[in-house]
RNA sequence: GCCCGGGUGGCGGAACUGGUAGACGCGCAGGACUUAAAAUCCUGUUGCCAGUAAUGGCAGUAUCGGUUCGAUUCCGAUCCCGGGCACCA
C-alpha cells in the first residue's frame, strides 16, 4: 500500500482520543519526582474564519516541544482553550441576531475539529473558555480582589483594602472617597478613546488596530473603570531583566512603560485674578535647562487655567479650550506639526533667575502626562522652539554641545574651590570674541535657527555653568529640594488600564450603584454574575452598553430594601486572557481560581508561543495580574512566562500578508486533504526559523510530502505491505551508527536550545534518509530510533510505522533516543589547504590527525607547491579537522 | 525624528566560539524507466573566463573602508528593507 495520509491520520487521531494519550494526570496522581514542563500557545479567538496556517505554525512548534518533553520524561502540561469574549462575535450577532454564545460554540467546534485534524496532542479535559460562567466567575473574582486592594508604596506591593490606614478626622464621606481613590480598580472621569461605530471606548493599545480597520476614534470625557497598572510600572520594567524573552519584545514593553527620570519644579504664578502668588508644578526631564525656561505651557484641561486667566484673555482661552476638546485623536495627530496656543495673561516666576515669564495654554501639552504643565526651554526643545518662534518668545541658550566646550570655556580656577567655571554670552571680559563657532552657535540658537536638544555643558546658568548635563541635573535638583522649589521624580508613559467597554459580549462587572452615587461591590459568593438575555445586541450609542436597556437585570433591590442599579459596562477581551494560563492548571476547581500548591508546581509557563502583536496588550496585562495575585499571596510566582517566543507570520505565496481581499489565503483543511497533517506540520517547521515571516509555498509542501513518501517506501514494501526486506534484525553497521548518532545529536540539540530552528532538524532527517537509501541492508534498530526522532514532528506516520515494524501502539510513551558523542564523530574529515587564505586543495584526512601530519600533507600537495613555488614561507597556521593556511610573502 | 531587528544563488534558507560560503528543500536543465504521461530514480545547478573534458583561474554574503594569516561572522561609515514609538516635556 502506498503512503495513505488520510487513513493513517484518521486512525491515529482516533487512537489518541480514545486512549486519552495526552491527558495530563490530576495533581494527586502525578509523579512529582519528575520534572515538569508547561508549554503553552496563546489561545485563539474562535473566529468564523476558522484556523489559519499561521495558527498552525506556532501550535506545531509547541506540540513538537510537548511531545519531545514527554519522551524525555517530563510531566507535560500542554492545554488549549478559547479567548471567547470579543467584538467580532458580537458584531455578527448584531448583523444576524444569532446569540454570541451560540455563534461562539459553533466556531469553537470548528476550531477544535481543525486542531485535532493536525494531530495536536492537547489535553482537552483542561479546555478553558473565557465566556463560560465557571471561568468568568474567577475573572470577576480577580476584579473584586483588585477593587478590594490598594497599593502600599512603602512595601511596594498590593494589600487588602482593610489594611489601608485612614487618616484621622475624616467624615464618612471623606473616608469613602479616600478609600475609593486607593483601589486598584476604580472609576475615573476623564478623556477616553471613544469609537462611535463600535459604540465603545478602547484602551490605548487597541486604538491603532481599530483605526486600521477603518473605524474612527475620538476623545470624549466619560466615567470609566480603570485598573491601576501604573503602580506596577517599575516592577514591570525591572523584572523584564529576568525573563528569557526576545529582546525586541522587552524593548517594546520598555518603551510602552516609558520610564523617565526628571524633576517637579514649582513656579510661582502672578495673575490679576489671584490676590496672592499661586503655585504651578511642572515636570521636566531637563531640570538643568531651568535658566533657559522663558515661558510655561499648560494643558487646556488643566484645572488651574480658569483661576489664572485674565479677563482680557478669557474669551480667547475659552474658545481654544472648546476647540481642542472637540479635536479627535486623529486630528491631533494630523495637526501635530502646527502648534497653537493662547496666552493666559498670567505670568510665572522662574525660580532660578527670578524672571517673569508668560503662561500659555496649548494642546501639545497633555493633561494625562506628568503634571499637565511644562516649563518651555525653546533653545533646547524642538516643540518649545517652534512655539516660541510662533509667539515671539525669547530664546535663551543654556546648553552647548561638547565640541564647542573647548572654544567656549575659559578655565578659571577660583582660588578657593578650584571649580571649573564656564562663561557664556555677555562675559566678554574674558575674551570670547575669538571663538567664532561659539558666537555663531549662540546667535543661531537665539534666532531660532538651530535647536540643540542633546546633552552638553551648561552656560548662562549661574551656579550650573560649566557642568555637564548629567552633573547639572543632579546639582539643580539638589538646589530645588534644598529651597523647597521642587524635587526629583519619575514619570511613566504607561497609563492606567481602561477596563470597561460599552458592549454586551464580555464579563459583567460585579458592581452596584446606589441612588446616592456610591459604589458597592458584590460579595465573593454573589458571583458569577451572568449576562442577561437581550433581544438587541446593538450598543445604545449614547455611551451605554446594551445591558442598560434590560431593566429587570439592571434594577435590583437588596433584602433590606435598598435600590441599586447594576454596572452596565462589561470587561475588555483582554481580561480573561490575563489569567487563563492559571486556570489550565486547575480547571475544575469550584472553590478557587487555581489551587496554590498546583500553581507552585506548574508555573511558570516554560515556553509560551504566540504572535508579536500581543507584546504590549496581553503580555503586559498578564504580567500585571500575576504580580497582583502574587502580592496577595494567591500565587507563588510573580512572572507568568519564563520563556516567550514570537512566531513570524506565514505570508501568502506572493510574499505578502494573507488576506481574503487579496485572495491569497491558504486553508489548512485543503492542505491536509492534499498532503496530510504530517506534511503540513513538517513543512511549517521547514520553511525557516520560527520567528521570521516567510511565504507559503505549495510546491514546497509537495516536496515535504515527497520526503514522507521516501521515508515510507524505505521501510514499507508497497507491493507486499510488509516491512522492506532490506531491513533486518541485526546490529547496525558502523556507518549507520555514525549517521544515526549525528542525527540524534542534531535534533536533540535543536529541541533543547530553545531557538526553535526546527528547519535544520528536518534537514538532518532528510540527510539521514538520503544516506540510508544508499545502503544495501538496514538494521531495524536504526529505523526504530529514527522513527522516534521523527515522531514529535510527524506523529501520525511515525505511529503507523512504529506499529507496523512490530511495536505496540503508542510511540509517544517511548523514551527519546540517546546519542553517544564518540559515534557522532566522523572517521575522516575534509581539510582545506590554503595559501594566503585562498583554498587550493581539499583532502580527506583521518579525524584528529595531528598538526604535524597536516602540515606535511600541505607541503607535499602539488597544488599547494605550485602556489608557494619561489616564495618564502612566513608561517603555517594549522587548525585540527579544519584547515591549514600557508602564509607566503 | 527616535529606538530595535535584518540584507547570503532564480526562491525558502544553512554555516559551531573568526577557519572549506551556499547544507537541506523548492524551482530549473539533462538523463533513465514508460507506447506516452504521471510517479520514481540518477546527474548538474552562485556568476564570469579558459578548456572537447576531467579541471583550472578570478570575483562573490547590500556598499565602502578597517582589524586579522584568514571575516557572512568583529569594528567604523553609508544605502535599503521590516518592526515599534511618536507633541510623553
Image (cartoon, rainbow, N blue to C red):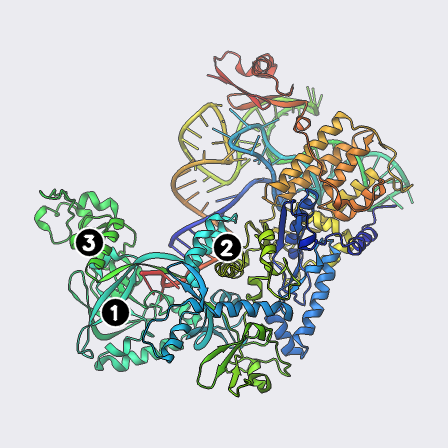
Q: Gap between marks 1 and 2, in whole Å?
A: 39 Å
Residue at x 32% of width, y 67% of height: A371
- In the picture as drawn, the residue positioned furthest to the right comes out as A720
Residue at x 62% of width, y 41% of height: A752
Q: Gap between marks 2 and 3, in whole Å?
A: 52 Å
Observer-nearest of A623 and A634: A634
Q: Determine whether, in the image, residue B66 is placed left or right of residue A818.
A: left
Query: For numbered disc 3, what is the local secondary structure?
Result: helix
Badge 2: chain ID: A
| Residue named by callout 1 | A280
| Residue named by callout 2 | A638
Query: For numbered disc 1, what is the local secondary structure?
Result: strand
Labels 3 and 1 within one chain: yes
Question: Mark 1 or mark 2, which has the lower sequence index?
Answer: 1
Question: Mark 3 or mark 1, which has the lower sequence index?
Answer: 1
Q: In which quarter of the view is residue A707 placed? A: top right
* Crowding at mark 1 (Cα within 10 Å: few <14, some 14-19, many 20+): some
* Crowding at mark 3 (Cα within 10 Å: few <14, some 14-19, many 20+): many
Can I make out residue A456 in this image? no
Q: Which circle, 3 or 1, is nearer the viewer?
A: 1
Observer-nearest of A55 and B79: A55
Can I make out residue A178 in this image? yes
Q: Is residue A405 above or below residue A88?
A: above
Q: Is residue A597 above or below residue A216?
A: above
Q: Determine whether, in the image, residue A511 is placed left or right of residue A661.
A: left
Residue at x 67% of width, y 70% of height: A104
Question: Mark 2 or mark 3, which has the lower sequence index?
Answer: 3
Q: Which mark is residue A442?
A: 3
Residue A590 image point, x, y percent: 64, 66
Amino acid at each position: 500500500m502506498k503512503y495513505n495520509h488520510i487513513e493513517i491520520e484518521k486512525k491515529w487521531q482516533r487512537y489518541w482520543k480514545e486512549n486519552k494519550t495526552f491527558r495530563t494526570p490530576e495533581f494527586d496522581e502525578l509523579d512529582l519526582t519528575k520534572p515538569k514542563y508547561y508549554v503553552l500557545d496563546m489561545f485563539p479567538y474562535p473566529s468564523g474564519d476558522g484556523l489559519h496556517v499561521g495558527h498552525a505554525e506556532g501550535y506545531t512548534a509547541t506540540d513538537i516541544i510537548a511531545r519531545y518533553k514527554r519522551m524525555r520524561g517530563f510531566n507535560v502540561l500542554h492545554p488549549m482553550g478559547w479567548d471567547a469574549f470579543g467584538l467580532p462575535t458580537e458584531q455578527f450577532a448584531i448583523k444576524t441576531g444569532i446569540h454570541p454564545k451560540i455563534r461562539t460554540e459553533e466556531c469553537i467546534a470548528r476550531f477544535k475539529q481543525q486542531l485535532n485534524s493536525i494531530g495536536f496532542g492537547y489535553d482537552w479535559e483542561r479546555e478553558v473558555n473565557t465566556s463560560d460562567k465557571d471561568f468568568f466567575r474567577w475573572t470577576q473574582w480577580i476584579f473584586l480582589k483588585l477593587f478590594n486592594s490598594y497599593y502600599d508604596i512603602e512595601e511596594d506591593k498590593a494589600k487588602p483594602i482593610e489594611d489601608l490606614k485612614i487618616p484621622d478626622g475624616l467624615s464618612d464621606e471623606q473616608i469613602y472617597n479616600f478609600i475609593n481613590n486607593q483601589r486598584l480598580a476604580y472609576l475615573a472621569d476623564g478623556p477616553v478613546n471613544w469609537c462611535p461605530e463600535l459604540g465603545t471606548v478602547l484602551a490605548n493599545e487597541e486604538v491603532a488596530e481599530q483605526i486600521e480597520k477603518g473605524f474612527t476614534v475620538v476623545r470624549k470625557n466619560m466615567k470609566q473603570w480603570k485598573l491601576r497598572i501604573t503602580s506596577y510600572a517599575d516592577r514591570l520594567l525591572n523584572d523584564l531583566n529576568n525573563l528569557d524573552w526576545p529582546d525586541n519584545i522587552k524593548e517594546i514593553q520598555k518603551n510602552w512603560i516609558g520610564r523617565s527620570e526628571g524633576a517637579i519644579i514649582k513656579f510661582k504664578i502672578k495673575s490679576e485674578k489671584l490676590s496672592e502668588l499661586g503655585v504651578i508644578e511642572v515636570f521636566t526631564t531637563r531640570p538643568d535647562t531651568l535658566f533657559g525656561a522663558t515661558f510655561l505651557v499648560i494643558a487646556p484641561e488643566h484645572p488651574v487655567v480658569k483661576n489664572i486667566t485674565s479677563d482680557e484673555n478669557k474669551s480667547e482661552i475659552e474658545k481654544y479650550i472648546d476647540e481642542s476638546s472637540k479635536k479627535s485623536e486623529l486630528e491631533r495627530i494630523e495637526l501635530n506639526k502646527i502648534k497653537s496656543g493662547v496666552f493666559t495673561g498670567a505670568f510665572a516666576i522662574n525660580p532660578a533667575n527670578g524672571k517673569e515669564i508668560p503662561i500659555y495654554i496649548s494642546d501639545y501639552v497633555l493633561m494625562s502626562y506628568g503634571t499637565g504643565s511644562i516649563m518651555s526651554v525653546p533653545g533646547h526643545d524642538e516643540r518649545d522652539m517652534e512655539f516660541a518662534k510662533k509667539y515671539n518668545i525669547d530664546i535663551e541658550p543654556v546648553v552647548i554641545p561638547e565640541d564647542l566646550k573647548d572654544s567656549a570655556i575659559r578655565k578659571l580656577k577660583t582660588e578657593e574651590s578650584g571649580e571649573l567655571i564656564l562663561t557664556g554670552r555677555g562675559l566678554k571680559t574674558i575674551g570670547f570674541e575669538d571663538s567664532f563657532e561659539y558666537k555663531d552657535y549662540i546667535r543661531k540658537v537665539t534666532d531660532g535657527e538651530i535647536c540643540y536638544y542633546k546633552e552638553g555643558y551648561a552656560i548662562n546658568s549661574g551656579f550650573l555653568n560649566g557642568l555637564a548635563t548629567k552633573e547639572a541635573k543632579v546639582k539643580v535638583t539638589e538646589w530645588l529640594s534644598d529651597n523647597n522649589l521642587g524635587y526629583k521624580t519619575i514619570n511613566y508613559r504607561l497609563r492606567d488600564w481602561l477596563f470597561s467597554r460599552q458592549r454586551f459580549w464580555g464579563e459583567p462587572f460585579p458592581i452596584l450603584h446606589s441612588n446616592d452615587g456610591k459604589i458597592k461591590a458584590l460579595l465573593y459568593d454573589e458571583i458569577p454574575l451572568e449576562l442577561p438575555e437581550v433581544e438587541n445586541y446593538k450598543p445604545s450609542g449614547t455611551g451605554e452598553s446594551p445591558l442598560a436597556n434590560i431593566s429587570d437585570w439592571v434594577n435590583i433591590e437588596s433584602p433590606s430594601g435598598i435600590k441599586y442599579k447594576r454596572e452596565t459596562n462589561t470587561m475588555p477581551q483582554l481580561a480573561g486572557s490575563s489569567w487563563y494560563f492559571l486556570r489550565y492548571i486547575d480547571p475544575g476547581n469550584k472553590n478557587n481560581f487555581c489551587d496554590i500548591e498546583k500553581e507552585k508546581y506548574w508555573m511558570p509557563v516554560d515556553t509560551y508561543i504566540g504572535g508579536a502583536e500581543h507584546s504590549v496588550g496581553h503580555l503586559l496585562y498578564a504580567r500585571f495580574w500575576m504580580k497582583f495575585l502574587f502580592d496577595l499571596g494567591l500565587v507563588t510566582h510573580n512572572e507568568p512566562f519564563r520563556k516567550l517566543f514570537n512566531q513570524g507570520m506565514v505570508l501568502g505565496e506572493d510574499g505578502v500578508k494573507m488576506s481574503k481581499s487579496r485572495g491569497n489565503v491558504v486553508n489548512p483543511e485543503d492542505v491536509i486533504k492534499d498532503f496530510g497533517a504530517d506534511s503540513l506540520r513538517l513543512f511549517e517547521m521547514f520553511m525557516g526559523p520560527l520567528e521570521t515571516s516567510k511565504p507559503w509555498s505549495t510546491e514546497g509542501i509537495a516536496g515535504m510530502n515527497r520526503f514522507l513518501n521516501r521515508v515510507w517506501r524505505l521501510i514499507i514494501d508497497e507491493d507486499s505491505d510488509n516491512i522492506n526486506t532490506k531491513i533486518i534484525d541485526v546490529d547496525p553497521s558502523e556507518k549507520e551508527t555514525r549517521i544515526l548518532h549525528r542525527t540524534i545529536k542534531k535534533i536533540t540539540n535543536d529541541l533543547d536550545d530553545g531557538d526553535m530552528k526546527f528547519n535544520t532538524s528536518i534537514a538532518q532527517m532528510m540527510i539521514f534518509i538520503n544516506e540510508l537509501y544508499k545502503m544495501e541492508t538496514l538494521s531495524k534498530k536504526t529505523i526504530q530510533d529514527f522513527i522516534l526522532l521523527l515522531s514529535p514532528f510527524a506523529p501520525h506516520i511515525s505511529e503507523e510505522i512504529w506499529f507496523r515494524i512490530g511495536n505496540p501502539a503508542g510511540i509517544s510513551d517511548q523514551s527519546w533516543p540517546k546519542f553517544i558523542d564518540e559515534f557522532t564523530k566522523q572517521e575522516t574529515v575534509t581539510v582545506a589547504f590554503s595559501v594566503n587564505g585562498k583554498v587550493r586543495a581539499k583532502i580527506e584526512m583521518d579525524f584528529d590527525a595531528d598538526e604535524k601530519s597536516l602540515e606535511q600533507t600541505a607541503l607535499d600537495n602539488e597544488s599547494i607547491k605550485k602556489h608557494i613555488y619561489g616564495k618564502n614561507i612566513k608561517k603555517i597556521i594549522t587548525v585540527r579537522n579544519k584547515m591549514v593556511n600557508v602564509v607566503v610573502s
